[in-house]
Amino acid sequence: MSLSDSAIRSAKPKEKAYKLFDGQGLYLEVAPIGSKYWRLKYRFAEKEKRFSIIDAYTGNIIVRAALSLAPWEIAPGRVDRV
């Protein structure tokens, strides 16, 4: 399920940071101070990793473009989306 722009804009800060999932490991993290960060969860060498795609929320189009261009196969290990 894809996050809508209105859902992202209406996300308000809470006492603790929380995540709004977009699908295929991509999510928006909302910090207690109100900052919004795009993150991507993936696995490398059987360990879960987290990658920050953009420092703050600037729009769905940029994030989706970056996600579609990102290389998922990295030698000699293998990267899988979580």
Image (cartoon, rainbow, N blue to C red):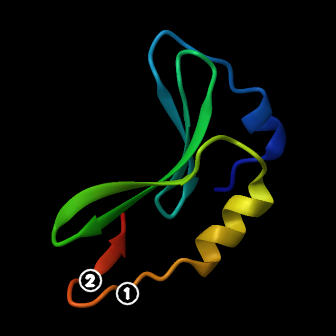
* Mark drawn on residue 73: 1
User: Would you place residue 77 above or below residue 17 in this image?
Assistant: below
Residue extending farthest to the right is 6
Q: Which residue is drawn at the image coordinates 25% and 57% (left, top)?
A: 48
Q: Which residue is drawn at the image coordinates 76% and 36% (left, top)?
A: 7
Name the residue carrying label 2: 78
With 64 as the anchor, is 50 left or right in this view?
left
N-terminal of the pair, mark 2 or mark 1, is 1
Q: Amino acid at mark 1?
A: Glu
Pinpoint residue 28: horizontal percent, then vertical percent.
58, 42
Report the quarter where the C terminus lies.
bottom left
Residue extending farthest to the top is 15
Quick one: SS at disc 1? loop
Quick one: SS at disc 2? loop
Pinpoint residue 3: horizontal percent, then vertical percent.
70, 48
Pinpoint residue 20: horizontal percent, then vertical percent.
57, 39
Report the Cα–Cα distance between label 2 and label 1: 6 Å
User: Would you place residue 12 above or below residue 71 in this image?
Assistant: above
Camera-side residue of 22 and 29: 29
User: Would you place residue 38 above or below residue 10 in this image?
Assistant: below
Q: Residues within 10 Å of mark 1 (few under 14, many from 20)?
A: few
Report the quarter where the N terminus lies.
bottom right
* Mark drawn on residue 57: none
